């Protein structure tokens, strides 16, 4: 897993909106990175786990919700590399029976369920110290995996071959914690990058992304922006229109999406194209960040 990044396909997506606007829209299929550790999680975990191996950590601890893509990918990657994993899960112990956490447990992850009040302490230094003492000094990786190691990995997502093939005017992706956008923007400092947060009131991400860039040892770039209106009602809020959009993309373009990140990103991007926010002849590269396992929560 840690040695070589996969070669990923780029899909031309022709829809009514792109044809009418005269815009080319390509989709980088990170969902095809790996059967389990798919999407941006491959890149965000790569150097976190390498750091754990290089520095003799016997375990890695991180945070997430009951259907967290990050928790799911961390559990599988840790199992593959012989690293014990611990998931601090927001919610009740009964969530352990859902498909995501069943998988995580099958791959050896220890689950530690906490209420929302305790989960809000996940950035507090004193709380992190108590977790380190409780679980025998694990490497603690932030929620979503976003730290300097994640940024380092995300800088490898857009390769020279992809740029040569697509020559995009803008790169677009969904945002949760901002680590992927930070890495992508740093890797293509002369190309516009647009993040579409899936959280309401996501203005805090502007400073978070700048901090991630700085923490990774690089001067923040100014080639990126956020469109905070693409959250579709808020995190994990799913409308009938969004479900219909997902069904349409799968049926007409053989494109599976998840309802938390990629469907909201792509739906909002097509609305931007329809509104005429891109000049005729523009080329956009959207990143399919994976996370398809999370769609199992729809059941």
Image (cartoon, rainbow, N blue to C red):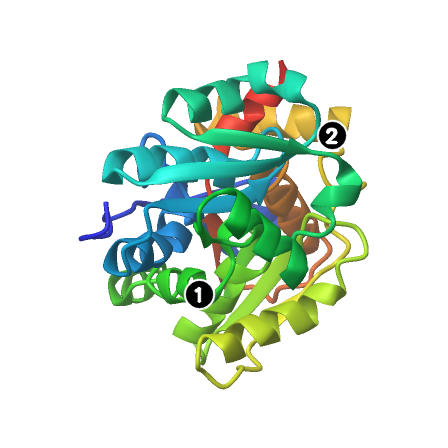
Q: Residues within 10 Å of mark 2 (few under 14, many from 20)?
A: some
Residue 170 picture location, percent across and down? 51, 66
Residue 84 picture location, percent across and down? 36, 37
Q: Which mark is residue 151?
A: 1
Looking at the image, is 19 positioned above or below residue 113? below
Local secondary structure at mark 1: helix
Looking at the image, is 109 positioned above or below residue 212? above
Q: CA distance from mark 1 to mark 2?
A: 29 Å
Image quarter hosting the N terminus:
top left
Q: Label 2 near label 1: C-beta < 8 Å? A: no
Q: Residues within 10 Å of mark 1 (few under 14, many from 20)?
A: many
Outermost residue toward the bottom?
Answer: 219
Q: Residue at x 47, y 51 (%)?
A: 287
Residue 162 visible here: yes
Local secondary structure at mark 2: loop
Q: Residue at x 73, y 55 (%)?
A: 275
Residue 75 picture location, percent across and down? 40, 34
């Amino acid at each position: 897993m840690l040695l070589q990044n996969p070669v990923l396909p780029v899909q031309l997506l022709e829809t009514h909106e792109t044809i009418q606007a005269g815009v080319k829209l390509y989709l980088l299929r990170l969902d095809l990175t790996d059967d389990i550790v798919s999407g941006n999680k491959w890149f965000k975990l790569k150097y976190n786990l390498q750091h754990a191996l290089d520095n003799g950590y016997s375990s890695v601890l991180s945070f997430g919700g009951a259907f967290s893509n990050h928790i799911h990918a961390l559990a599988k990657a840790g199992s593959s590399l012989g690293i014990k994993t611990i998931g601090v899960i927001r919610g009740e112990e009964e969530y352990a029976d859902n498909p995501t956490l069943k998988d995580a447990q099958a791959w050896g992850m220890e689950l530690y369920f906490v209420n929302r009040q305790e989960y809000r302490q996940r950035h507090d230094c004193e709380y992190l110290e108590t977790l380190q003492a409780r679980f025998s000094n694990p490497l603690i990786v932030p929620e979503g995996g976003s730290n300097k190691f994640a940024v380092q990995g995300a800088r490898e997502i857009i390769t020279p071959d992809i740029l040569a093939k697509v020559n995009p005017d803008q790169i677009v992706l969904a945002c949760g914690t901002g680590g992927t956008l930070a890495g992508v923007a740093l890797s293509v400092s002369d190309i516009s990058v647009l993040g579409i947060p899936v959280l309401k009131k996501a203005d805090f991400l502007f400073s978070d992304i700048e901090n991630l860039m700085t923490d990774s040892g690089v001067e923040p770039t100014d080639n990126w922006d956020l469109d905070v209106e693409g959250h579709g009602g808020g995190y994990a809020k799913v409308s009938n229109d969004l479900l219909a959009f997902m069904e349409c993309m799968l049926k007409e373009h053989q494109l599976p999406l998840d309802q938390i990140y990629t469907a909201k990103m792509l739906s909002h991007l097509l609305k931007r194209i329809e509104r005429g926010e891109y000049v005729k002849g523009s080329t956009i590269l959207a990143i399919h960040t994976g996370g398809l396992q999370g769609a199992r929560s729809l059941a």
